[in-house]
Image (spheres, rainbow, N blue to C red):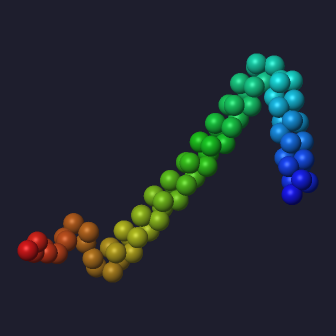
Amino acid sequence: MPDKAASAAAYASSAVATLFGLSLSQVVALGGLLIAAATFVMNWYYKQKHLDLAREQASKQRNGVNQDEQPNHPTD
């Protein structure tokens, strides 16, 4: 257990030293890269969801089910 704490402290101190060693423009550039990567991941995720929905809709249309015609269900 003490090894984990020592390892975590070593990594944390090296991260802090690295961050404090960067200039403001380098910090902003790093932040921009992180935001760009997050945007890429989010766009990929939602494009995949959109593709899944489009495939599902195409499959329903091929099987003769029209999404606009939904069965009426009584609400009693």
- Where is residue 22? Give x, y as percent: 83, 23
The residue under the point 26% across, 69% down is 67
Along the viewing direction, whichever of 10 and 76 lies nearer the viewer: 10
Q: Is residue 56 above or below residue 31?
A: below
- Where is residue 36? Give x, y as percent: 65, 38
Which residue extends farthest bottom?
A: 63
Quadrant in which the C terminus appears: bottom left
The residue under the point 40% across, 70% down is 56
Q: Is residue 62 above or below residue 39?
A: below
User: How many tags in the picture?
Assistant: 0
Which residue extends farthest top?
A: 24
Quadrant in which the N terminus appears: bottom right
Q: Is residue 4 left or right of residue 66?
A: right
Along the viewing direction, whichever of 58 and 49 lies nearer the viewer: 49
- Where is residue 42? Give x, y as percent: 56, 48
Q: Is residue 26 left or right of residue 73?
A: right
The residue under the point 36% across, 68% down is 57
- Where is residue 44? Give x, y as percent: 57, 52
Q: Is residue 66 left or right of residue 32?
A: left
Along the viewing direction, whichever of 34 and 76 lies nearer the viewer: 76
Q: Residue 39 falls in which quadrant of the image? A: top right
Q: Is residue 76 left or right of residue 20?
A: left
The residue under the point 39% across, 75% down is 59
Which residue extends farthest front?
A: 2
Q: Residue 21 falls in which quadrant of the image? A: top right
